[in-house]
Image (cartoon, coloured by chain):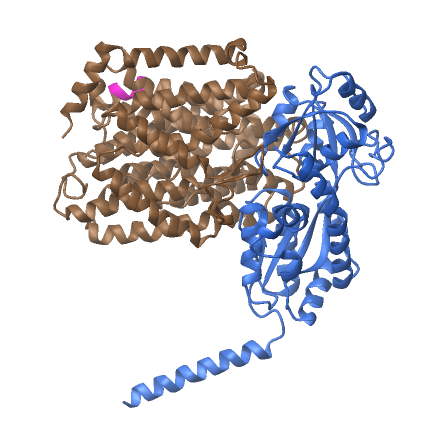
Amino acid sequence: MRLTRVLVAALAFAWVSAAYSQTAQPYPNQPIRIVVPYGPGGATDIVARILGERMTTLLGQPVVVENKAGGNGVVAIQDVVRSKPDGYTLLIGNVTTNTLNPIIVGKEMPVDPFKELVPITKLIEVPAIFLATKVNFPPSTIQEVVAYAKANPGAVNFNSAGYLAYSHLDFIQLQKRTGIEMTLIPLKAGAGGGQIDLINGEVHVAIQNAATVLPLVQSGKLKALAVTGDKRLAGLPDVPTTKEAGFEGWGTNAWQALFAPAGTPQPIVDKIFATVKEIMISDDAKKKFADVTMTITLSDSPAGAAKWLQSERVAWEPVVTEAKQLAKP
Amino acid sequence: MELLSHIGFGLSVAAQPENLAFALLGCLIGTLIGVLPGLGPLATLSMLLPITFHLEPVTALIMLAGIYYGAQYGGSTTAILVNLPGESSAVVTCLDGHQMARQGRAGAALAIAGLGSFFAGTVATLVIAAMILPLTRLALTFGAAEYFSLMVLGLIAAVVMARGAIFKALAMTIIGLLLGLVGTDVPTGIQRFTFGSPELYEGLDFVTIAVGVFGLGSIIASLEAGEDAQTVSVLNQKITRLWPSRDDFRRAWPAVLRGTGLGCVLGVLPGGGAILSSFTAYAIERKLARDPSRFGKGAVEGVAAPESANNAGAQTSFIPMLTLGIPPNPVMAVMVGALMIHGVRPGPQVLEQRPDLFWGMIASMWIGNLMLIVINLPLIGIWVKLLKVPYRLLFPAILLFSSIGVYSVNNSTFDVVLAAGFGVLGYVFAKIGCEPAPLALGFVLGPMLEETLRRAMLLSRGDPLVFFERPLSCAMLITAAVILAVVLSPQIKRGRNEAFQEQP
């Protein structure tokens, strides 16, 4: 009898003190989860892990990266929005998972990432390279590709990983802009292997992120015709930007951004923002990301991030709607 | 001579104490997760990636690689002991390996698998060092048409390999193909059989199906049969011997040689290389055997050939990553990611700019294999004792680890529920006497078959002759046709039926 009472009292004390310490300790007082909407190893995962490791040091709590692939990010987004908006669950999303796919899927999305997630900050831009094979394909500028495709309608093959992925959208826009006709050789979403088809000449042109394909260009296995973004790449000083090549405004820079569930308290969002900012402006991070051809592009504040995401959405909506019409199977 | 100096240089890197220590750590972790049913190298690599942040890139890579082939070794242990393949390439090992275990020859099966893998690993290391550039060129000559023909050849081999009624094998292969259809249709983005759940958009996962159909299915069947039913439980068989007999060795070594050769070549091809090499190696042994009816009933060649093939293949699958920076499978993608986190961009320049990384990695493969054989041979005694654990204690453990394994693939409870569903299906298959192995092959190859067919047709603008115009593709299709003709010829058909009737 007495033993039970002592036990109950002890448990109650433990519970109260645990609850007390939860409220008294400032954020963060438990491990933080960063959900990545892809399997391990890709660009989004790399960003999450570099960031997570440094956040662990700065925040004094373990920051764990959790890979949750599926449904072009929908599975991960669902997981995050169902979690408590307390700053212990975050998401690293990218242009595909948090802008393109929600627009493409539209009303059938089981969750609305524009409404149920808030961006904390944009993190990274990954420039892409417009590539061509060195086998059986003479053109070495975008203009020459266009001329070649005009002379041989439908003969030029391009590949893209995933239906209406951003590189697919870029090619749809290029075809519309110049009136040429090219043939899509689709790849599974997020799949590697597209590079082999380019090296052996089955596919003639592609747009792929620089982080992955730069070594293949530098070693002469593939031709680089142009790079997206407004600056030339340090590793490819002779390759023009799309703008310099006469295609201003064409070609997507993929981005990654950090999100939290809507309703996360503003002080916590601000604290995460400040931590991430401290990490991203350090020389160490700059070098780390530059090494893998990623450009740090931080928002000025969480409010700025929200504005930027809205502008992304507005910019992509007409493009996707039109592409859906053009690419109808 | 250049080759020797390269290997020597590699060994000097790999034999540094720190690299040795992490290779050992990797091999131990790999063996452990390989043995635990359902836990695979991919989830482990992604969980352990943070550990490697503070290591030298070459050390990190050595440890991650150790986990990868350690898991290959460990995976065959689970396949042999409890009939549960952790990876698609271990499916075939179950066929004869588990039968050997039931006959009390688990020790022999494990030893042959280990020694065969070690031999294959040694040869593959030399092959990589000597022929990495020609093998890279081979990987590059494989276009969509060649892949398609290779898949056709593989599927035909699966049907040949199946024991029992050809009709059932065909039916299981087709069920596997159908399961492979689930997911997003690549060229159009249309959902197939996903029933509105985003968890299915990328298709079913192999581990979910394997744990369900192989693992849970056989647990249900065993429980129904009761503990004393000798036919379903390995546990009541007395263990005759721990070490392979002289006869086992005599039968195994030619199979190991053939398996190694096949694995070295097919491993280079991204995607289906690993599973194709083990299935094809098995099919070849069956065809060459004087008495094919022994297969599926504990033929030692049926363990030796696929195990050597998949270990050789696991190593040569590093080639596209090492020479081009192109990961041929998800595990390699994690390794590429790990290198990039270290600021090393994998690609053709690695060989020139970081020879320590390149040759150190290759040499460490052999050291890793040596460690694995040293770790695993003494463990055989322990594994075999594990079989004496009463089933009522063993099966909850299998169930628990399987569930954790399935969950860890994608951190998803949905997959665990799916695996349970496949468990029921596996039970039904066991009841009606259908082998799940052809299902696994159909499931893995089906989507690739479809994808490569459509790609090849897109590339040829709808001209099916492309499959015959390309010599490599044409040769493989002819081989497939010959195999099919041989199997369907009346004489052999009679032989097959007799073999089938022998079975209870």
Which quadrant would residue A24 be assigned to in this image? bottom right
Q: Is residue B320 left or right of residue B101?
A: right
The residue lying at 69 percent from left, 22 percent from top is: A204
Colour blue maps to chain: A
* Spot occupied by residue B440 in the image (x, y as percentages of width and height): 37, 33
In this view of the protein, can residue B186 be seen by the observer?
Answer: yes
Q: Colour of chain B?
A: brown
Reply above or below: A53 against B32.
below
Q: Position of residue B318 (x, y in %)?
A: 53, 29
Q: Looking at the rendering, in which quadrant would you find the N terminus of chain A? A: bottom left
Q: Which quadrant of the rendered structure holds the C terminus of chain A? A: top right
Q: Residue furthest bottom?
A: A2
Q: What's drawn in magenta, residue-wise?
A: B250-255
Residue in front for this viewpoint, B342 or B481: B481
Please tell me whether the stretch drawn in magenta is mainly helix, strand or loop. helix
Q: Is residue B254 magenta?
A: yes
Res B476 → quadrant: top left
Of residues B354 and B344, the one nearer the viewer is B344
Residue placed most toward the observer, B353 or A47: A47
Q: Is residue B49 above or below residue B269?
A: below
- Residue A267 in the image: x percent, y percent? 69, 71
Magenta span contains residue B153: no
Residue drawn at point x = 31 percent, y = 51 percent: B399
